[in-house]
Amino acid sequence: MKIYISGRISGQPNLNRGAFNDAAAAIINEGHQPVNPHDICEGITADNEREHWRKCMRRCLAELVNCDIMVTLDGWEKSEGATLEVRIAQIIGMRVLPLSALKLINSQPFEPVFGC
């Protein structure tokens, strides 16, 4: 399964790369394919931080909708981008779990909850 990683990036030391890389390694260890926003946004250039954020979000959202599941990192609720990603995942019926529940992905049935 393709698993999208969502969490805080902006304003975090080293853009929280360590937490995203650790999550990607855990996903691979469970036999799945991680989708890491840091990989998606590599090479994007912009004139200012907000323009860079917008370009990254466009790319990330395009990748997100092609994933099977989303895992969230601690503190995602404090991120404008992660909050948007989680909401979109919920609206399209994607399973959203905290990273700590990664091992449950293969063991529990999932019925999406629809509604806005």
Image: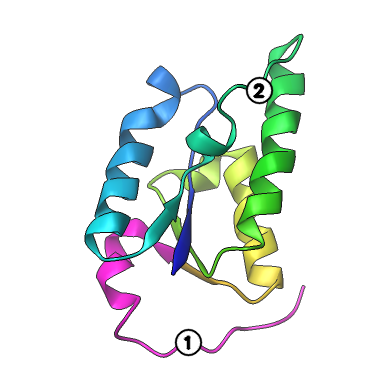
The front one of 112 and 40 is 40
Q: Is residue 27 left or right of residue 80?
A: left
Q: How is the image coloured?
A: rainbow
Magenta region: 97-116
In which quadrant will I find the C terminus? bottom right
- For label 1, the crowd category at 10 Å Cα-Cα, with few meaning under 14, some 14 to 19 and many 20 or more, is few
| 15 vs 60: above or below | above
Can you see residue 74?
yes
**Which of marks 1 and 2 precedes in the sequence?**
2
Circle 2 residue:
44
Residue furthest toward the top?
47
Q: Which mark is residue 110?
A: 1
Label 2 secondary element = loop
Tell me the CA gap for discs 2 and 1.
35 Å
Residue at 45% across, 24% down: 15
Vertical relation: 56 (above or below) 1: above
Is residue 104 inside the magenta stretch?
A: yes
Q: Is residue 66 above or below residue 52?
A: below
- Three-letter code, disc 2: Ile
